[in-house]
Image: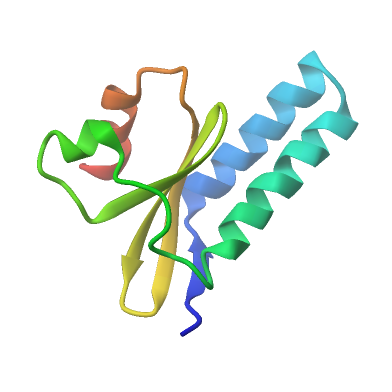
Amino acid sequence: MKHTVHLVEDAALDMTGIARYIAERDSMERALSVLAKIESLCDGLEESPSRGNYPPELHKMGITHFREIRFTPYRIIHEIVDEKVFVHCILDGRRDMQSLLRRRLLR
């Protein structure tokens, strides 16, 4: 069964920030390459929404309705609701993930 994938506003802003950061510090070509890979991973959630694992920071708190897939160093956090997949955030895993996830997902 195919799911529909929805990029929530925060995740879209994350992608813009990632692209801007890479373009400023490396090149626009590299930024576009990273974005294409992230988009491909998000699109793949249509067919395999349950792949990946539970974000450990949330799993420790007993929260298991979010999943993540990784494209190091990025972590794509998503939630499956019926036949829909909501990509909530795309974050650099080198940051303070506990605080970020708590602020972004558990408000």
Q: Nearer the viewer, residue 76 or 11?
A: 76
Residue at x-position 42% and y-position 61% = 86
Q: How is the image coloured?
A: rainbow
Q: Is residue 4 left or right of residue 21?
A: left
Left or right, residue 97 beside residue 19 = left
Q: Nearer the viewer, residue 8 or 91?
A: 91
Residue at image point 50% right, 81% down: 2
Q: Quadrant of the C terminus?
A: top left
> At 21% from the left edge and 38% from the top edge, which residue is drawn?
58
Depth check, front residue: 62 or 19: 62
List x then y, in percent, for residue 7: 52, 58
Which residue is pictured at 72% across the width and 33% down the height? Answer: 19
Residue that extends furthest to the top in the rendered view of this protein? 25
Q: In the shown orientation, is residue 88 left or right of residue 31?
A: left
Q: Which image quadrant is residue 96 in?
A: top left
Reply above or below: 66 against 30.
Answer: below
Whole-percent x and y of residue 49?
43, 65
* Residue 24 screen position, x and y as percent: 79, 18
Please tell me whether residue 44 is drawn above or below residue 63 in the rendered image. Answer: below
Q: Nearer the viewer, residue 34 or 15?
A: 34
Task: Indicate whether 64 appears above or below 72.
Answer: below
Q: Residue furthest bottom?
A: 1
Total count of labels: 0
To which quarter of the image does residue 84 belong?
Answer: bottom left
In this rendering, is residue 40 above or below 81?
Answer: above
